[in-house]
Image (tube, rainbow, N blue to C red):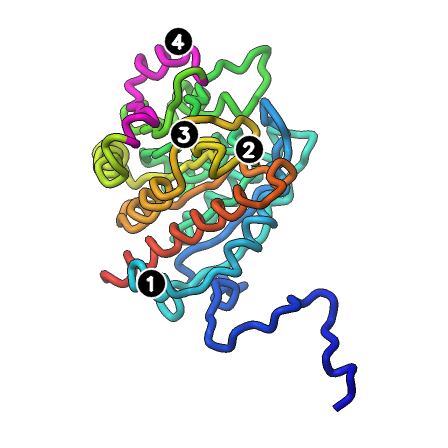
Amino acid sequence: MSPFAWLRPPDQSPVPPDPHDVRIADLIRADPVGAHVALIGIPFDTTVIGRRGAREAPAAIRRALYRMTAFDLESGVDLAGLLHIVDLGDVAVVHTDVHETHRRVSAVIAEAVRRGLRLLVLGGDHGLSYATIRGVREGLGGEPIGVIQFDAHHDLRAPLEGEITSGTPFRRLLEEGLLQGPHLVQIGLLGGRNSRAYYEIARQHGVHGIPAARVHTAGPESIVQTALVHAAVGTSGFWISLDMDVFDPAYAPGVSAPSPGGLIAFQGLTMVRQLAAHPACLGMELVETAPPLDPDGRTVALAGALAYRFLVGQGELRRQR
């Protein structure tokens, strides 16, 4: 045998794949027809208030997710043959035009929802939530939806001098009537990260806030049941909006605004899987992962695991049918 037989092309892994592994990458299809879940990337972080880098997240999270195996031993769910996944690629954003980017995002999301797809959206900064949630509403013909937001912050800031930021999306949604306060649940809020003024805005709109401390004491299962009462009842379904700064920096340091005292990884992974397995779940967005701020890759790894848990929950739901 020629010694050159040991050489591999530079774009391949130096470790040969295990022939017994079926990975998420093996399940991805290009045609949305017949798919159950669609991945959409939004590489956009123009509106982030703090440190940038989230525009690089869609590619990084995909790499982490696609390496994971299709079999989840915790639940016994094997996604192979159970869940059809399509990757629709990335929205063509315009980094210097927030309004145009949001218009494109809403149009893409609305079309995917009209096609009956459940969505896994990889952002991007949290300002995108205004566009994604607007798109979900449009895709449902304007029917009311609930939102379960994982975040250390309310994101109910007023757009000062008209500036749209990652801190304003839910204020805009509430004031434009695209989201009703009683159907918005905010999980993981932290002291020292929110002003009294925005706490009062949340209270006035009837938003249901759950501080991180309550998650630590009550446990993830109890929090999920509370959230579903507000977001899934009286709506056409609910959307999960997960800002990675909801986690303690020990688990997710690579974010714009690290938040000591936040959730631990187990809590987030458990809640995402349980919510995704609910028949009213319309999809999930993962925002504010910033690979340039994540030198050891632990934030990207957790984001990939959360995306995986969403798929497992969707697999559980299909297994029950």
Q: Earlier in the sequence, mark 2 or mark 3?
A: 2
How far apart, in angstroms, are the residues tagged by discs 4 and 1?
44 Å
Give me the disc on residue 138.
none
Q: Amino acid at mark 1?
A: Leu
Q: Amino acid at mark 3?
A: Gly
For disc 2, the marked residue is 255
For disc 3, the marked residue is 262
- Up/down of 284 relative to 260, above or below: below
How far apart, in angstroms, are the residues tagged by discs 3 and 1?
27 Å
Question: Do callouts 3 and 1 mark residues in contact (Cβ within 8 Å)?
Answer: no
Q: Earlier in the sequence, mark 4 or mark 1?
A: 1
Residue beneath the point at 47% across and 45% down: 302
Give me the disc on residue 73.
1
**Disc 4 versus disc 2: nearer the observer:** 2
Q: Which percent across, then down, holds residue 313?
A: 33, 53
Q: Earlier in the sequence, mark 3 or mark 1?
A: 1
- Up/down of 238 relative to 47, above or below: below
How far apart, in angstroms, are the residues tagged by discs 4 and 3?
19 Å
Question: Do callouts 4 and 3 mark residues in contact (Cβ within 8 Å)?
Answer: no
Q: Quadrant of residue 43?
A: top right
Q: Amino acid at mark 4?
A: Arg
